[in-house]
Image (cartoon, grey):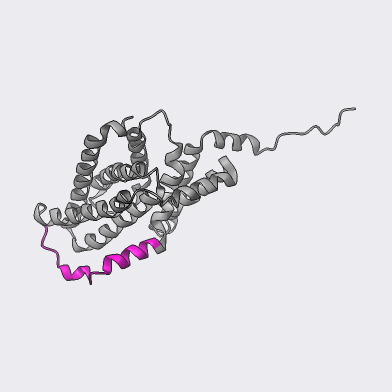
Amino acid sequence: MESQHAPTDSPTAAPLALLRRHPLITFFTLAYAISWATFYLLDGPVIFTIGPFVAAILTALITDGMGGLRDVARRILRWRVKRIWIAAAFVVPVAIGLAVAALTTVVGGAPMPVLERLGPWYSPLLMFAMLLFTADTLFEETGWRAFAMPRFPADRSPLANTLVLGVLLAGWHLPVALSEPGALGPYLVATIASAVVTNWIYYSGRESAFLAWMYHTAANTAGQSFMPLFGGESRVTYFWVLAGVNVAVAAAIVLVNGRELRR
């Protein structure tokens, strides 16, 4: 005799199945929603970067369970790569930062910054350590490159996937970019171009999100060290030069490594 209480599917089964079929859409929707909500609820980017981190954790659990979390952790901690790429993760963003500061002063007509405002020689090291401690760059790269990048279509070239990621990152940064008067355009262009530079190191270093984390932290260290030296019109000039230098470096990378990036 058949039971009158035949088993029924859980009401959450269909939504979960939909989320599992579209992990990238799930992730980016959550990342945008969480970050933008915190920005407007807290009146600024107080915990803005928590979005991609929480989105990565939740989506990894939904789609792959604990195995998904372990994969994300392995990627963000993948530090065993060739030393040249570890060096590049630090040298390239510092070189870009120095070039932007110099060009803003020389080409942009900005007044010569007072070097004493940079503080003692070890100030950038303290800044780097502080940025690691606050974990903003860790939160971002756990989402962008430890979770999202490995799930981009494998039949698309690394360059195409990188440009898509860059546009999505630019969109995610919109609330922050809009809070910088006059800098919206260059801010977004710099974000897309920087994604190309960062992913060059990421792909070259065995798709190590750890390298992207270090690159991102070094780039933010350079930016937070040099940007306060420029105010008023010079600050807008700084953002345009930042965009131009990142575009130039990204273009050089594509020209030199085009075959690998378009494979």
User: Which quadrant of the figure contains the C terminus?
Assistant: top left
Residue drawn at the location 52% of the way across and 49% of the way down: 57
Relative horizontal placement of residue 36, taking residue 179 as reference (left or right):
right
Relative horizontal placement of residue 25, taking residue 91 as reference (left or right):
right
Q: How many marks?
A: 0
Instruction: Point out residue 224 in the picture as x, y percentages from the top left corner.
Output: 27, 61
**Relative height, residue 78 to residue 261 (above, below):** below
Say if residue 241 shows up in the picture: yes
Instruction: Point out residue 96 in the picture as x, y percentages from the top left corner.
Output: 22, 52
Residue drawn at the location 22% of the way across and 38% of the way down: 251
Instruction: Point out residue 140 in the picture as x, y percentages from the top left corner.
Output: 41, 51
User: Which quadrant of the figure contains the N terminus?
Assistant: top right
Queried whether the magenta region covers residue 2, the answer comes back as no
**Relative height, residue 84 to residue 228 (above, below):** above
Instruction: Point out residue 17 in the picture as x, y percentages from the top left corner.
Output: 60, 34
Say if residue 37 shows up in the picture: no
Q: Which of 47 and 53 is in front in this view?
A: 53
Relative horizontal placement of residue 113, taking residue 173 as reference (left or right):
left
Residue drawn at the location 30% of the way across and 57% of the way down: 218
Q: In which quarter of the image is residue 223?
A: bottom left
Magenta segment: 110-132
Decide whether the magenta segment is chiefly helix, strand or loop. Answer: helix
